[in-house]
């Protein structure tokens, strides 16, 4: 018996989120179903965090204990042979018995994609938000989020009475013709925080909100909520890219 850490990718379109919930189709329930076919007898896999319905992942991390006598690549292949086509194990690592993908994480990185086009594009909108009217330059807005702030106005705590202070290590906007990509890395995120940040930055880029309102809300989160419109960027544009740990375990 050993503990294994896996890097998991999935198209979130067909899932009710990553976390197991009743009879709904989730990433966790599909992974546990695949593991049971390999003799897993646990009750719940450990995951680095939850993603909402429709949110994608390239670097979700899960861990489980399994009696496996073959190679790591064979475990990866065995899982992929059983998992549905919208999920894949990218890597398997044998880790320590104490490893926890959520509590041991140093940071998470998310990517949000959008494009500015008047007419809908069915081939892009599965993985990006179509925005119209177009946005002006979003690049200067990214630096607002870097540092340690109370993000209470930009998301909900992940547990009752949970803290809303987070440290953002990096945030950038990049443009390629009509497409924009927002990447952000933080020690942790509030519930729906990234989608909220993107929605508000787009509102600034469309001239519906001032960047000063965002600054004021960061400085005074309780009073600042009155300055901001409600709304979230669609889930389809969001992807969990990577979860980072202090120790790379081989």
Image (spheres, rainbow, N blue to C red):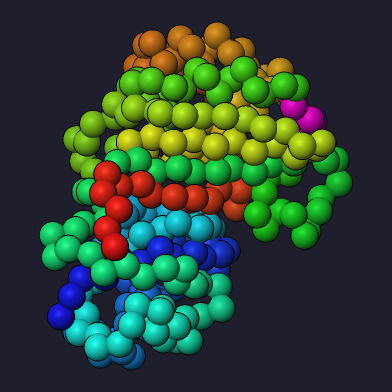
Q: Which residue is drawn at 52% across and 19% down?
A: 143
Q: Does the magenta stretch include residue 133?
A: yes
- Please state which of residues 208 and 33 is positioned toward the viewer in this rendering: 33
Could you tell me which quadrant the C terminus lies in? bottom left
Q: Report the predominant secondary structure element of the magenta stretch.
A: loop
Q: Measured from the top left, where is residue 82 in percent x and y?
A: 45, 86
Q: Image quarter for residue 157?
A: top left
User: In the rendered image, is residue 50 in sight?
Assistant: yes
Tell me if residue 13 comes above or below residue 40 in the rendering: above
Tell me if residue 166 comes above or below residue 105 in the rendering: above
Could you tell whether 221 is left or right of 159 in the image? right
Could you tell me which quadrant the N terminus lies in? bottom left
Q: Image quarter for residue 99?
A: bottom left
Q: Does the magenta stretch include residue 64?
A: no
Q: Which residue is drawn at 22% across and 80% down?
A: 66
- Please state which of residues 103 and 201 is positioned toward the viewer in this rendering: 103
Q: Measured from the top left, where is residue 3 in percent x and y?
A: 20, 71
Q: Identify the magenta region.
A: 131-135
Tell me if residue 23 comes above or below residue 56 in the rendering: below
Q: Image quarter for residue 198?
A: top right
Q: Measured from the top left, where is residue 128 in percent x and y?
A: 67, 49
Tell me if residue 178 comes above or below residue 39 in the rendering: above
User: In the rendered image, is residue 43 in sight?
Assistant: no
Could you tell whether 184 is left or right of 127 in the image? left
Q: Measured from the top left, where is residue 12 in percent x and y?
A: 53, 62
């Amino acid at each position: 018996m050993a503990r294994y850490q896996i890097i998991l990718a999935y198209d979130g379109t067909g899932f009710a989120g990553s976390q197991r919930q009743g009879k709904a189709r989730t990433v966790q329930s599909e992974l546990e179903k695949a593991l049971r076919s390999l003799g897993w007898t646990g009750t719940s896999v450990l995951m680095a965090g939850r993603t909402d319905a429709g949110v994608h992942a390239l670097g979700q991390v899960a861990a489980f204990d399994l009696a496996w006598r073959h190679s790591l690549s064979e475990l990866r292949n065995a899982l992929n042979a059983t998992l549905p086509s919208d999920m894949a194990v990218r890597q398997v690592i044998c880790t320590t018995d104490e490893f926890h993908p959520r509590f041991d994480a140093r940071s998470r990185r998310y990517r949000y994609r959008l494009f500015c086009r008047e007419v809908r594009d069915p081939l892009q909108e599965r993985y990006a938000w179509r925005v119209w009217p177009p946005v002006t330059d979003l690049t200067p807005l990214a630096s607002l989020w870097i540092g340690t702030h109370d993000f209470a106005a930009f998301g909900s705590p992940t547990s009752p009475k949970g803290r809303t202070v987070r440290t953002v290590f990096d945030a950038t906007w990049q443009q390629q013709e009509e497409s924009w990509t927002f990447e952000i890395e933080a020690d942790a995120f509030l519930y729906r925080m990234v989608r909220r940040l993107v929605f508000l930055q787009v509102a600034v880029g469309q001239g519906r909100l001032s960047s000063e309102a965002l600054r004021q809300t960061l400085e005074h989160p309780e009073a600042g909520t009155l300055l901001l419109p409600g709304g979230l960027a669609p889930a389809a544009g969001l992807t969990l890219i990577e979860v980072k740990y202090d120790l790379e375990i081989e």
